[in-house]
Amino acid sequence: MTTSNFFNWSSVRSVGLTMKTKTMKTKTLAYLCIAFACFMFIGNAKAQVTIGSGLAPEGGSILDLKEHVAGGTNNETADKGVVLPRVILTNKYELYPMYWNSNTNSEIADYTANKAARKLSHVGMTVYNVTTSTPSDFVSGVHTWTGTEWRKIDDSPVIQPQITNLICGSAQMTPNTYQATVPFEGILKVPYLGGNGGSYDGEASYPIGNDLHIERIGGKLAYGGGEVMYRVFGTPANSSPIETTISSINFLGFTCSNTKIGNGMTGINLRTLTTQTVINTEYNETTLATVSDELPFGTITIPESGSYAFSFRLYGQISYGNATMRFPFYIFLSKNNKSVMSNLVDAAEIDLIVNNTWDYSYSVTLGGAFNAGDEVIISMARPGLGSWTLKTNSNPASPIRTSLIYWKL
C-alpha cells in the first residue's frame, strides 16, 4: 500500500468521521428541539389549552373550545358542538355506572372505601343520561353531579315565549319600602296569564326615577299563570312612602304604564264597593249562591295559583221596623261562574240581631284554593224578611263603607 493510498484512505476516513459527528450533532439537536417542544406543549397543557384551532385560548379559561376567531354578529367562535358522554344513570345518590362493576354486580372497591372523597372530587361532572326506564328516578337529558346527588339540567323546549295578558294592577315589589341615601335591592313581580313555557331573555337596566334602576331577570314562562320578575336597585333620593312611578314596563308585547312602587304597601289588596248594593235575593237551600246578589268589588283576577283569604267588612242599613229579630244573612265565595254549584269555594252565615233601622257592621273571612286566571265572585243572600243595603264611599279613609282585603296565604 503506497503512502498516497494510505493518505487518501485516511482522508476519506477523516471526512467520514467528521460527517458522522455532524450527523450525530444534528440528530441530537433535533431530539433536543422535539423534547423542548414537548416540554413547552406539556407546560401549556397544564396552564391553558385551545381545542379546535391553533388560536390562543381566552385569558380567563383553562380550556377553550373554538374553531375560529370571534367575528359573527353574536360573537360565535365555532360551528360545531360538544358531544357529552352518554351513560345510563341508575342511582340518584351514587356515582353509578362510573364506580359500578357490572361483572360482579357490585361497587368498585376503591369507591366503597373512599366514597366521601370520590363523591366530592367529582363535583361538576356532567353526562347525558340515555334511559327513561321504569322504575327510575331519571329521564333522558343532561345531568350534573353536585357532590351528593345527580341533578337534571333543564331541557325546556325551544319555543317563542308568549303570554295572553299582563296583570299590571297586581304588580308587587318586595320589600316595598326604601330609605333615602341607603342602597336598595328589591324584586318587582308582575303577574301574567297564558304562559306557554317558553324561555325569555333578561333586559338591560334603565333608570326609573328617584335614583333607582330596573332590569328584567331572564327566565322561563310557566304554563298558564306566573310572574315575570324585575330587579329594582339603586340609592333612592326619597324614602317611602314617597312612591316611584315606573312609566313603562314592556313584556312580550304587553305594557304596564305608571306602575307605582315604594309606597310601603305589602301583598294585601284592598277593594271597596263600586256602587251601593241592596241584598234582596232570598236565601234558598237548593240554589245557594247561584242566584244571590253579587257584590260589585270590581273584577278580581287571581294572579298566581294557590290559597287565598278574603276578609270583608260589611256596612249598611237593615230595614225592618222596630221589632227585635235575628237576621241570618249568607255570603258566598265563588269563582268564574257562580251558576255552577261546583264553583262555590266557601260560604258563611252572618247572624245579626236587629231592633231598628240602623246601620250595622259585620266582619267575616272566607278562603279557598284558586288557579291563576280565576275570577273571584262574592255574593250574598238575605233571610226570609228584611234586606241589607251595603254602602260604598269614595273616600278610602272613611269607615262608613263596605270593603274587602284579600291576600295569598
Image (tube, rainbow, N blue to C red):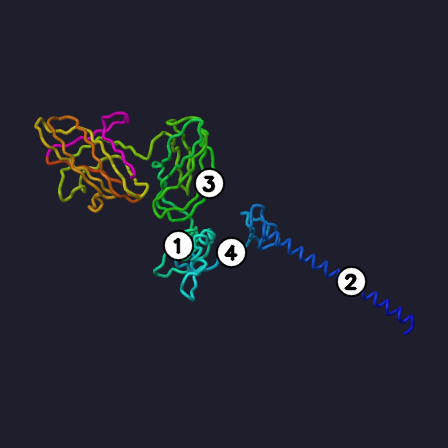
Q: Quadrant of residue 8?
A: bottom right
Vertical position of residue 52 compared to residue 343: above or below:
below
Residue 156 in view (yes/no)? no
Q: Disc 1 marks which amino acid?
A: Tyr
From the viewer's perspective, is residue 403 above or below residue 216? above
- In the image, residue 408 above or below residue 50: above
Q: Which one is earlier in the sequence, the residue at label 1 or at label 2? A: 2
Q: CA distance from mark 3 to mark 4?
A: 29 Å
Q: Main secondary structure of the magenta part?
A: loop
Seen as rendered, the residue at the extreme front is 113
Point out the frontmost of discs 2 and 3.
2
Residue occupied by mark 3: 203
Q: For marks 3 and 1, give the one nearer the viewer.
A: 1
For residue 2, which quarter of the picture? bottom right
Q: CA distance from mark 2 to mark 3?
A: 72 Å
Residue 398 painted magenta = yes
> Amino acid under label 3?
Glu
